[in-house]
Image (spheres, coloured by chain):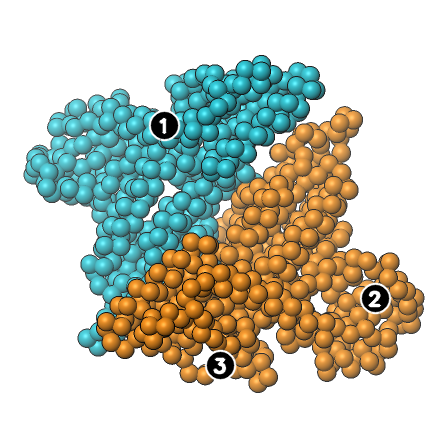
Chain colours: A orange, B cyan
Amino acid sequence: MAKDFATREEDYSKWYNDIVLKADLAENSAVRGSMVIKPYGYAIWEMMQAALDKMFKDTGHENAYFPLFIPKSFFSKEAAHVAGFAKECAVVTHYRLKNDEDGKIIVDPDAKLTEELIVRPTSETIIWDTYRKWVKSWRDLPILVNQWANVVRWEMRTRLFLRTAEFLWQEGHTAHATKPEAMEEAEKMLGVYTTFAQEFMAMPVLQGVKTENERFAGALETFCIEALMQDGKALQAGTSHFLGQNFAKAFDVKYLSKENKLEHVWATSWGVSTRLIGGLIMSHSDDSGLVLPPKLAPHQVVIVPIYRKDEERIAVIEKGKEIKKELERVGIRVKLDDRDTQKPGYKFAEWEFKGVPLRIAIGPRDLKNSTVELARRDTLSKEFTAMEGLKEKVLDLLEEIQESLYLRALKFREDNTNSVDTWDEFKDIIKNKGGFVMAHWDGTSETENKIKDETKATIRSIPLDYEDSEEGVCIYTGKPSKGRVVFAKAY
Amino acid sequence: MAKDFATREEDYSKWYNDIVLKADLAENSAVRGSMVIKPYGYAIWEMMQAALDKMFKDTGHENAYFPLFIPKSFFSKEAAHVAGFAKECAVVTHYRLKNDEDGKIIVDPDAKLTEELIVRPTSETIIWDTYRKWVKSWRDLPILVNQWANVVRWEMRTRLFLRTAEFLWQEGHTAHATKPEAMEEAEKMLGVYTTFAQEFMAMPVLQGVKTENERFAGALETFCIEALMQDGKALQAGTSHFLGQNFAKAFDVKYLSKENKLEHVWATSWGVSTRLIGGLIMSHSDDSGLVLPPKLAPHQVVIVPIYRKDEERIAVIEKGKEIKKELERVGIRVKLDDRDTQKPGYKFAEWEFKGVPLRIAIGPRDLKNSTVELARRDTLSKEFTAMEGLKEKVLDLLEEIQESLYLRALKFREDNTNSVDTWDEFKDIIKNKGGFVMAHWDGTSETENKIKDETKATIRSIPLDYEDSEEGVCIYTGKPSKGRVVFAKAY
């Protein structure tokens, strides 16, 4: 592969796009704003799904599936919810095509729906309409359900993985007898997301709650994790909502309590999406392409055979197969690139760009010396190492790479987090440096909006220990503040 | 659970519906024709997905994801395809809602799409529009891609799992350099489906090809597997299509061959859906409810503790946990039903109705005697057995149940397959007995249609060895026939 991609310095936005396209992760489709997730990108999503799904099940959740379409009237039932989602949705109005007199395909005007259907932007309404049938008594609670699904939000400005009209996600929807139980659930899932982001994606995140402005439409409290990307912008990586009794009231979901009283049910919802792949890319990748943390890499090791003559080819591929088998026996995911249609140099460049954590090259001389060449993607360093003990070495290295990617990203975040006490300094840092800015704020939406208008920075989150930390005065109004909140420009 | 469900004899159709609803598999939703797949039903689908996905990957396929929406114009590009699908599709015409003067939510007339979008009924068109960008030379072939997705077909008469407006499925879409390679792929996937149906679902199937009438819209050849349900009707359980160069020509997908010539690419597509759950139910279930083959049962064993006093409860649950752990260690999926809110009798009935292959009951006396009560769902037989060696006994029984369900279904099919040589006998059997009817046919769509009009029976498939078997004369026209084909009434 020729060097035909941008560096971060040259053009961060093009760098990101080049990685998505040239590492074969995704591409734009013929449908405005909808992407095609290519096999390599989808394999990363499958790794993410497997890890998350296990964590959901380990915390007592089950999967289910609810309809793609939601009757329009359902959206009117929860006032805040419709205000948040009505502006950006795909509407199904007809159910048939036909040929017109010229044989052209047109929408059949006789096949108009009496009530339009909305392609789900999120499923609270259809799910709470269903839960009404599932809940009679306290014995039916809690309901701990998750759904893996596609959703559609009619975004005007889209970007591969980060913001697309259609995306894939999971949405958990739980129902509880009491407020504390629901709150505990919302916090528990924030914890699951945090663990996933940090331990699997190697992406450090800040936990917090959203301000009223940034809260999910219909939630009483939105918990979130926020990560810092390499251009100094924040990415919301997952949210968990305490919905109170809003949806239970809108859809009339009540249960008979142990005390024989009819009560409304308490709710949470929580989700992460294919947007995480965008976060993964921007957390670790460098000017040589994608860098994948071993735990989410579809191939953790790629083996590239080096040969000239046919008999060399047979011997090194034979050895490659042997090593592959040995590594796979301890659970390592290995790709043997035995394509005869490409030269080793091309393969090196390709797998480097695709972010495979470790590359093993074997040539005829290695066979003689019982060595291999081992290259690390994160540091781009190479070394010769003995074939004996290779398995242990690879296992250690994969762990080391996972850890060191996390620490590198954590250091980046720490280097790009500033506590700021004056409005001038705030504006300067937001404009010229970016990153997370910890600053005092007077707690009003009015001030939050003014700061956003003047600097484009938003409050990413209010830290969970907000009220226990230092008091101060708002950088913008000078009014009292209970603690510092996290500002940043955001994706 | 009280006996409040229909038997097959009383009302087959109600029996089926009762199982779906009362075994908590699925239910109708507020959206016409769209079902909610409940956690227990979805867990069966997850078991099916896991088994199929592994088989797809073992045969070299990768997963990817393509857009939900397809531009209307794409459908016009393949003539047979549009004729087959245009009649039954959901059409997105607008992308925004708004409040009218009275505050009511309406579709915003200003947000009309310039080109309507079709919610995918199947993805050949959008995928082949994408493959055009992926294929340049013979080196880019084959493309072996599968997608797990939801699709929508606007069915007028729907039935849970068997025929719903929205359903879940997988659709494989492959691209090949040559016709023999594509044909080999289509046949290979028919083999995968056959293995899955017989070895996992314990559902015997007939392999064959569809007549022109029944072929997939856009295919040159449709391979299929057909299963026989307990009411004597056939269920199409999976199809694999050889698409020739139809879609490559419609979407201009060409490759440069090794001989440096531009050639159109050859295609296949193949799919199975949540309809299989309907087939699973109707293959094995009985008048006591659902019967699940062990390989697809979310819980292969349920343990029900029996107790009166609190100290008994603690002891039997302790033992239950121990047994669960021991069985899980050898990969058995075990549910310990330790709910204190329901009596053992209720639990017995519930898990029996939900088709769990084996039930283990443990009471205080069992603790004393070191025994358990072991009940088989398929035969409804019970026995006391020693705790020692329980693990091996359970493993053996699960295998035996899997095998015996298959043999029972096979015997049912054999008992309900008849070779018929006269038109009167044909009409009589189709009307009064059902099942598969092997009969000679003159090979014309005209005769096929007349038989369908008169008897409602269709040609389910032409056996793969059709031309190598006996010749004869058409039961309807008396014209020459090359071999017997399979007739039945079908779902």
Q: Which mark is residue A484?
A: 2
Which one is earlier in the sequence, the residue at label 2 or at label 3? 3
**Disc 3 marks which residue?**
A5
Q: Share a chain, discs 1 and 2?
A: no
Residue A385 image-quadrant placement: bottom left
- Residue B309: where, in percent of width, then height? 69, 16
What chain letter is assigned to the residue under label 2?
A: A
Question: Does residue A157 appear in this view?
Answer: no
Above or below, A90 against A124 in this view is: below
Secondary structure state at the residue bearing disc 3? loop
Discs 3/1, front: 1
Q: Nearer the viewer, residue A97 or B293?
A: B293
Q: Amino acid at mark 2?
A: Arg
Above or below, B103 against B385 in this view is: below
Q: Nearer the viewer, residue A115 or B53?
A: B53
Q: Share a chain, discs 3 and 1?
A: no
Which quadrant does the N terminus of chain B fall into? top right
Crowding around mark 2 (Cα neighbors within 10 Å: few <14, some 14 to 19, many 20+) is many
- Residue B41: where, in percent of width, then height? 49, 37
Q: Which residue shows up at 80% across the image and 65% down it?
A: A485
**Disc 1 marks which residue?**
B400
- Residue B230: where, in percent of width, then height? 34, 26
Q: CA distance from mark 3 to mark 1?
A: 59 Å
Q: CA distance from mark 2 to mark 3?
A: 40 Å
Q: Which residue shows up at 32% across the image and 74% down it?
A: A364
